[in-house]
């Protein structure tokens, strides 16, 4: 499960763990608590899905701005399928209660399961090799408090490496 989901379920379980058999809660109270748990699960489902801001691979004139709430992610799927060299840059700022000095990295940047280091603050990555076989670039908010990451001037450019196979390239067939 994503960290956000785990926290939501932890919160629900925390409420139920404080119940004691002596508490003699009526069916009405238990029903209300169950509805709250279902509602929290639905909120977690909605927030856990990655958003898809405007995709703009190698379109430097079109920087993208977007927000990532706690545990949320943004996904870009317009990358070449083959091996590629990538440049990624953005300005990140955090907002929310107790977020003015978090001491943490803001975003995790990944191609599938291959991530860049331990996260980044205002990333400026040049020449990162994207593995073949994935077309997804994902940015995930790493903050565990209710902190929103504002991503500004996000630009990325992944160009196929010479000899790498793009999804538009087809192998030559000799008969």
Image (tube, rainbow, N blue to C red):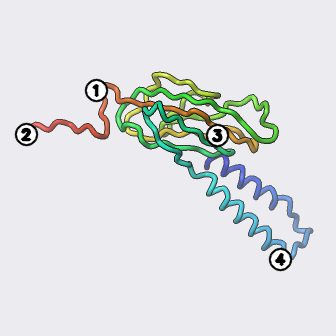
Residue in the image at 51% along x and 32% along y = 155
Mark 4 or mark 1: name the one nearer the start of the chain: 4
The image shows residue 73, relative to residue 43, as above or below, that is: above
- SS class, disc 1: loop
Residue 28: mark in rendering: 4
Left or right: where 100 falls relative to 83: right
Q: Depth check: give the residue in front, 46 or 13.
A: 46
- SS class, disc 4: helix
- The quarter of the displayed image where residue 165 is located: top left
Residue in the image at 76% along x and 58% along y = 12
- SS class, disc 2: loop
How much space separates mark 3 and mark 1, taking CA atoms? 34 Å
- Of badges 3 and 4, the one in the foreground is 3
Residue in the image at 35% along x and 34% along y = 82
How much space separates mark 4 and mark 1, taking CA atoms? 66 Å
How packed mark 3 is, by other alpha carbons closer than 10 Å (few <14, some 14-19, many 20 or more), is many
Q: Which residue is mark 2?
A: 175
How packed mark 1 is, by other alpha carbons closer than 10 Å (few <14, some 14-19, many 20 or more), is few
Q: Position of residue 121 (x, y in %)?
A: 65, 28
Residue most toward the front?
61
Mark 2 or mark 4: name the one nearer the start of the chain: 4
How packed mark 4 is, by other alpha carbons closer than 10 Å (few <14, some 14-19, many 20 or more), is few
The image shows residue 144, relative to residue 101, as above or below, that is: below
Mark 3 or mark 1: name the one nearer the start of the chain: 3
- Of badges 4 and 1, the one in the foreground is 1
Q: Which residue is mark 3?
A: 141
Q: Which residue is mark 1?
A: 163
Left or right: where 32 falls relative to 5: right
How much space separates mark 3 and mark 4, taking CA atoms? 38 Å
């Amino acid at each position: 499960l994503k960290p956000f989901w785990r926290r939501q379920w932890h919160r629900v379980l925390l409420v139920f763990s404080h119940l004691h058999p002596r508490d003699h809660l009526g069916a009405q109270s238990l029903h209300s608590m169950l509805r709250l748990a279902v509602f929290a699960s639905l909120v977690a489902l909605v927030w856990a899905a990655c958003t898809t801001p405007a995709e703009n691979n190698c379109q430097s004139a079109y920087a993208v701005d977007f927000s990532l709430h706690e545990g949320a992610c943004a996904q870009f799927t317009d990358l070449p399928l083959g091996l590629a060299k990538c440049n990624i840059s953005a300005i990140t700022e955090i907002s929310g209660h107790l977020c003015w000095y978090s001491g943490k990295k803001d975003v995790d940047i990944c191609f599938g399961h291959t991530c860049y280091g331990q996260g980044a603050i205002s990333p400026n990555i040049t020449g990162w090799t994207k593995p073949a076989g994935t077309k997804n670039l994902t940015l995930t908010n790493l903050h565990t408090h209710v902190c929103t990451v504002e991503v500004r001037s996000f630009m990325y450019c992944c160009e196929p490496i010479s000899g790498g196979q793009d999804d538009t390239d087809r192998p030559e067939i000799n008969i």
